[in-house]
Amino acid sequence: MLASIIALDGPASSGKSTVGVLLAGRLNYLFFDTGVMYRAVTLAALRRSVPTADESAVTELAETVKIDVMPPLFNDGRQCTVLLDGGDVTWDIRAPEVDGSVSQVSAYRRVREILTDEMRAIAKRGRVVMVGRDIGTVVLPDAELKIYLDASAEERARRRHTELAERGIDKPYEEILAAIRERDRFDSSREHAPLKPAPDARIVDTTGLSVGQVVSHLLLLVKAVAIQPSG
């Protein structure tokens, strides 16, 4: 049978979410972008007037809220359904005020530990494509298949530039490239869970490849590591 738990990592703008959604769809798996967990905690803090700069208060909040990630419950464009204390917050966690605070919340060590345990619990249900920057190395080191998507900084900047242009946002390519390089530097040198491929990850360089080509390649990897049934 096919690998039931797939870890998908990679740097910013490497195509993880785009490819992950399509891969999960082809396999009929849950697409789980782990960033939604940090967004849910951030939203909870904002709703309860907990200062996101107060690490101890945010950590205490993360210990008490209940977050769950499920397949889409509605056909409204969502990639999954995110529940916060039983309420559907799938779109609420995309609010601009959450965007402005989630990086700070996700940097707190204890918050990461708490949410990592939650991510593992969800993964144990099986049939999941989990996407992030430390899935194969920290969250799911025993995942049956670990994939690390990569591409040159220039390629990732070009993709981001095109994406923004299609949304009517005119941002200089050079500015985007500089931001991606800085994000790479930060993610790879951070103290907690730095960005790096797991030792046994399949590294896939997507430079010059279309989304369809990448998805086809990943499906081949999934089939190549099919788990043999016991007995």
Image (cartoon, rainbow, N blue to C red):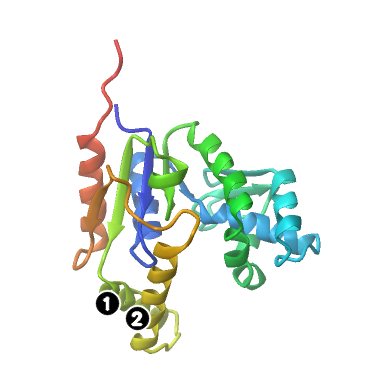
Q: Is residue 73 visible?
A: no
Q: Amino acid at mark 2?
A: Leu
On-image quarter of the N terminus: top left
Judge whether 173 appears above or below 127 on screen.
below
- Number of numbered markers: 2
The vertical placement of 126 against 7, above or below, is: above
Q: Which mark is residue 10?
A: none
Residue at the limit of the structure toward the front, as seen here: 191
In the rendered image, residue 38, in percent from the top left (x then y), is placed at 59, 56
In whole angstroms, how far apart are the C-alphas of marks 2 and 1? 6 Å
Circle 2/circle 1 CB separation < 8 Å = yes
The residue tagged with tag 1: helix, strand or loop? helix
**Residue 26: horizontal and vertical position, in percent?**
33, 44
Residue at the top extreme, as displayed: 231
- The residue tagged 1 is 154
Q: Name the spot of residue 113 as percent of width and height, x first.
A: 58, 46
The answer to whether 53 appears left or right of 136 in the picture is: right
Measuring 45% from the left and 45% from the top, which residue is drawn there?
138
Which residue lies under the disc numbered 2?
A: 177
Q: Nearer the viewer, residue 82 or 154?
A: 154
Badge 1 amino acid: Glu
- Name the side, left or right, on which 6 lies relative to 56: left
Q: Residue 202: x and y, percent?
A: 24, 47
| Picture residue at 34% right of the left edge, 62% below the top | 15
Quadrant in the rendering for residue 166: bottom left
Q: Residue furthest right?
A: 49
